[in-house]
Image (cartoon, rainbow, N blue to C red):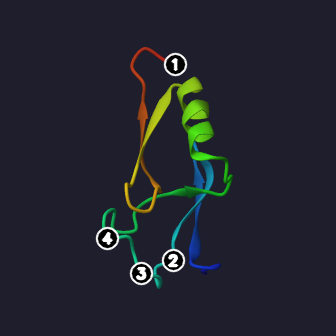
Amino acid sequence: MCIDGWQPEGIHPILGPVFVACEFALACTVCGGCSWFPTDRTALYLQVRRLEKAGYRMTCCLACLGITNIIPLKGGSR
């Protein structure tokens, strides 16, 4: 089921509820449509800070700004 080009992906253990690009929409040419988009549309820099406080770092697609990976920080939060 797609909603305005987005498809619910489920509950990510760190990000919470997330969407992915709808399978019928044009996928990002950089990440291939494999990025997560949290339903909490907090500004990107606030997402980064929240994840760092929880001991994680995220990587983003440079084209669509979706989250492509969540990586644990070594030694916990900064």
Query: Measured along the vertical axis of the image, is residue 28 above or below residue 69?
Result: below
Q: Position of residue 21 (x, y in %)?
A: 50, 71
Label 2 sits on residue = 22
Give the label on residue 26, or none: 3
Taking the spot 59% from the left edge, 60% from the top edge, the residue there is 10
Under mark 2, the amino acid is Cys
Q: Quadrant of residue 6?
A: bottom right
Front label number (4 vs 2): 4
> What element does badge 3 sit on?
loop
User: Mark 2 or mark 3, which is nearer to you?
Assistant: 3
Q: Residues within 10 Å of mark 1 (few under 14, many from 20)?
A: few
Q: Give the labeled residue for mark 4.
A: 29
Other residues around mark 3 within 10 Å, as few (<14) / some (14–19) / many (≥20): few
Name the spot of residue 9 as percent of width and height, x first.
Answer: 56, 64
Q: Position of residue 73 (x, y in %)?
A: 42, 24
- For badge 3, the amino acid type reads Leu
Asked if the residues shown at circle 3 and circle 4 are in contact, with their CB atoms under 8 angstroms apart, the answer is no
Three-letter amino acid code at disc 1?
Answer: Ser
Q: Residue at x 47, y 82 (%)?
A: 25
Crowding at mark 4 (Cα within 10 Å: few <14, some 14-19, many 20+):
few
Of pointers 2 and 1, the one earlier in the residue sequence: 2
